[in-house]
Image (spheres, grey):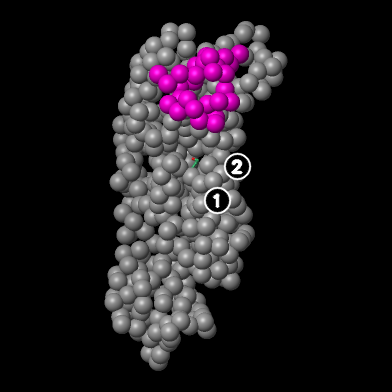
Amino acid sequence: MKKRKLSIGLFGLGTVGSEVVGLLAKGRRELKRRYNIELHLKRIVEIDLNSEKAKMVPQSILTPLADDILNDPEIDTVIELIGSVSPAKKIILTALKAGKNVVTANKALLAMDGNCIAREVEKNNCHLGFRAAITGCHETLNYLAHTSTIQSITGIFNSTSNYILSGMEQANESMEKILKKAQKYGYAEQNPSLDIGGVDAAHKLIILIRLAFATTLGMNELYIEGISGIALQDIQFAREMEYRIRLLGIARRDGNKIEARVHPCLLPEEAPLSLLKGVENGIQINDRSIGQVASFAEGAGGAPAASAVISDLIDIAEGKSTIWPREASEKLSVKPMNSVKFKYYIRFNAENKPGVLARIASLLGKHQVNIKTVVQKEESHHNFTPIIMTTDEAKEENVHRALKLIDQLTVIREKSTLIRIEDLFPTS
Ligand code: HSE
């Protein structure tokens, strides 16, 4: 068997980078035996040479200087695990221009600058590995890139949000407390508002849309809503109705139009994505040719992401990599969110007095929103009480119009909570 060797330069020695160093050291013999592959880590660039993680690696290969990798003609493959877009973009483009392959976990960069990276990959005839950008669903990337019959993608793409929502559900604890734990274990981004605000999931959805639908969407074309509006009581009320709340990313093709959105959803408790807890991610793909395809795996933390990086390195050593499609010549147009129809969960905080329910129902009715179920909770606070409604399918625009008027009523305290219901499987 032909021996294949990569000479590697690694940028970043954080949660994932240090795990990659460990896996490369541990897996050396096995890689040689199974694939006759040698993955030689020649240099590590890390700014903080005194960090605990820096002390654990061979000091002779550690450097604070990016050029020690970028200008080394022997290094043929660069792993970029810095995280933020800058200076990662410059590093990646310089590496590609120098003819080096690149492996990156940088979903923000791929989502926002995917075209310029695609051009350099092609021009310089390099490989690009990006499994770690979509750690929890990376087994499906090649399939998505090679299939032209995908109708929809639905998934949990952000581990921190899933850790928080499922953690609140299990421990009955506040979002704040559980986020602190997620940060402690290194799941959250350097700026956790990217996780909580749905932006990280949106980056990943843009990458998946590029693969599955050969179309490049800008961040401003997606509807993005995070989980900060979800209260512990919503999780509890949803459970009473046999639902779970999860942050979903959804892309659904309809002719030359596409729905592209990230927001919290109520899912039936038996839906596969409802079963995902902690840092688990999952993707359900609806393929016109073969039906449902699903994949579930942990989506954050050192070990899963590092294992995704190693898979990319093995592919590159074997002369192959996942396709990173060029800029699409024709774009699908994104359906305006206001025109999409959903079923809804709505929680009002209403004064407990005669006629209140009738006024809410009347405003919903005037906007063609049909109430399906209503529950008024006994536990009231200063005579205010939660009223929980679910609705039949209604147009997003109509629901917002009705809620705007309802929230202006003096009998309503605080903005009402609106969560869309996705009845996943079998109809997704
Ligand atoms: N912060 C990310 C998440 C890490 O929570 O999913 C993996 O991309």
Q: Residue furthest front?
A: 50
Which mark is on residue 181?
1
User: Quick check: is 309 in the magenta stretch?
Assistant: no
Q: State which region is magenta.
A: 38-65
At 51% across and 62% down in the image, what residue appears?
A: 174
At 40% across and 41% down in the image, what residue appears?
A: 203
Residue 362 in the image, given as x and y percentages of width and height = 35, 82
Amino acid under label 2?
Answer: Ala
At 39% across and 55% down in the image, what residue appears?
A: 225
User: Mark 1 or mark 2, which has the lower sequence index?
Assistant: 1
Is disc 1 surrounded by few (<14), some (14 to 19) or many (20+) residues within 10 Å? some
261 over 300 or under it: above or below: below
Return the residue at label 2: 297
Amino acid under label 1?
Answer: Lys
88 over 242 or under it: above or below: above
Which mark is on residue 27?
none
Residue 232 in the image, given as x and y percentages of width and height = 51, 66
59 over 141 or under it: above or below: above
In the image: residue 294, left or right of residue 33: left
Between 200 and 355, the residue placed more toward the observer is 200
Between 299 and 214, the residue placed more toward the observer is 299
